[in-house]
Image (tube, rainbow, N blue to C red):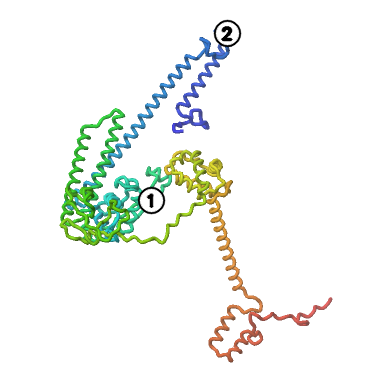
Amino acid sequence: MDRLGVSRDGAGSDPLCQSCWQGRQDRAAAGERRRLAAVLRERLDVDVPEGCGACGSAHPVPECWLCGWSHLAAARAAQEAVDAAEAAREAERFALLAQITEAEGRVDELAAWVARLRAVVDGYPAGSGRSRAVELLADLLARDAAARSTARGRPGALARVAGVLAVDADWRSGRRAMPGRARSAELAGCTERAVTAAWSRAAGLGWAVRTEAGRRLSLAERVETGRAQDRACYDLVPLHRGDPAGRAGYVPAALAVLADLVEHAAALLAAAQEHLDGLRARAGGWVERREAARRVELRAAVATTVGRVRDVVRASIDGGNLFPPHMVSQGEYLSSCSYRGLVFSPPIAPAASEDRRSRREGRASRSSTSRGRGLRRDGAGSPRAWRPRPFERPSAGPRAHRPRPQWAGWAYDLARAVQGRWAWLRPVALPRVAATLGAMLGPDWTAGALDAWVRRARSRPLLVEPRDPAAYLRAVLEDALTGPDAPPHPAARHTRHQRVLAAMQAAVQRERRDQARAAEDERGQAAVRPGARSAAAEAALAAIRARTPGHLRRADRAALLDPAAGGGGECAWPAVAQPGGGLPPAPRP
């Protein structure tokens, strides 16, 4: 219990909280009063009636006006309803205060991010050190453009994600960039999958190096840090290792990306402030005039910063044609004005197609309608603007369909039953649950058998609201199917686990057997058998063969091996005692 206190009844007794101890004291005092009243009645010889004076019943009857407790029960029920309503209002008020605190923290975080982006963008014309992110982002754009083999395709989220990564890094060195996947997706306005792909692309281009991998923290680390996941950390490449001349042409594009990030962050900040105002209005609060004025000033400053950057980008586009024009028809050029930064876009007349057959038979197409001829704003041909359509090669045959998995016939029914039994698994898509169950279980399993086996095999109870239900389902099955006890029905994960254990045991036994054989061979080689040559004899024979010819080394070899000629050897038998060779017998007395 959270309110446990010290013992009130002496050493060895259980500790009680204040309310429990007070209740115990009250009950003890009431019992003592009843005992004293009984003793007093016995001494005074007072006859106290045991039943009710009106109805004579020994127990309270609701219909009796004297002993009935109907009015007391109604009053008690009314008071309990009032207490429950008050408790609900207090709980709602505390929950609203917690939401207001969280919303204030989010507003402060987004305001700090907007201030950091403005410091980067506004400090670049003055040469401030905090504008290093502009050069870093321009370096990435230059590397990406150099690595591309074609200019076709839709623009991805690499520039925006890299802009968040560059601004989040240390402005002094470009290291320790750790924005987090979910936060990067929110600040860049894309999905988390796009963030992962952008990080991989940046690391592949050599622009970012991952120094710390994200992982799930332990219980002690979660208690200390207050979060469940550890973010990945990236170090960006220093500017002196890049190409200054190559990235100089992409500085306007980097400024445009950062300006988009500023606008997006300002929109997020405005939405967070509106949400905070709504929560404060529900709690009976209001927005102070100083805070409202500060919001207006911040929005004006953001608009000024974005406008200045747009002017710089527009000047670079007009002067150097930073973004190559996209050749479209007369009816499509108006949609590209805001993207290219132009107030009015010049009309582009489509050229006549040459020997081009359309599969759509006269329907609209967004692809280029000219071959070998492109139009610039000055009307001259431009090979850079010409993007020919690739040739359509006939395929060898229809694409092979992916084979249907074996669990497709039974896993879906099992997944529906399991979702009906485990409420925390209902938000997960049914195919994902079916794939997880089909990869680890068999067709003989049922939802009841799975629930009973998981609760029996695991020592810990199941969570009510896990953060990632699909991952938690895999962890639960992994824990339940890799124990020493066999499950009631065949399971693929348990079978693979047993095979791995058998392979490991066989490898250990094989290693021990090989070690025993090697030790036995070593002992056999070291031992000298009767009638065999020792290692010293073999070495002496090899030396004799090396330094003498064949007809001379026979005598040396005979002297070495013959005990009589060589004076004995390791292979000579000991002398046998002959009859009469011992001591003379002693004379008899």
Going by the image, does 121 lie left or right of 30?
left
Is 516 placed left or right of 164 in the picture? right
Q: Residue 454 at what x, y percent from top left?
A: 53, 43
Q: What residue did someone put label 2 on? A: 46
Residue 169 appears in the figure: no
First in sequence: mark 2 vs mark 1 = 2
The part of the image, by quadrant, that contains residue 90 is top left
Check the image and name the residue furthest to the bottom.
551
Residue ID at (67%, 81%): 572
**Looking at the picture, which amino acid does disc 1 mark?**
Gly
Q: CA distance from mark 2 to mark 1?
A: 82 Å
Q: Amino acid at mark 2?
A: Val
Q: Residue at x 66, y 77 (%)?
A: 530
Q: Nearer the viewer, mark 2 or mark 1?
A: 1
In the shown orientation, is residue 459 left or right of residue 532? left
Provide residue 587's location: percent of width, then percent of height: 82, 78
- Quadrant in which the C terminus is drawn: bottom right
| Disc 1 element | loop
Mark 2 in CB contact with mark 1 (< 8 angstroms): no
Dot 1: few (<14), some (14–19), or many (≥20) neighbours within 10 Å?
Answer: some
Neighbours of disc 2 within 10 Å: few (<14), some (14-19), many (20+): few
Q: Quadrant of residue 2?
A: top left
- Whether residue 527 is visible here, answered yes or no, is yes
Please provide percent x and percent y for residue 227.
38, 44
Q: Which residue is mark 1?
A: 214
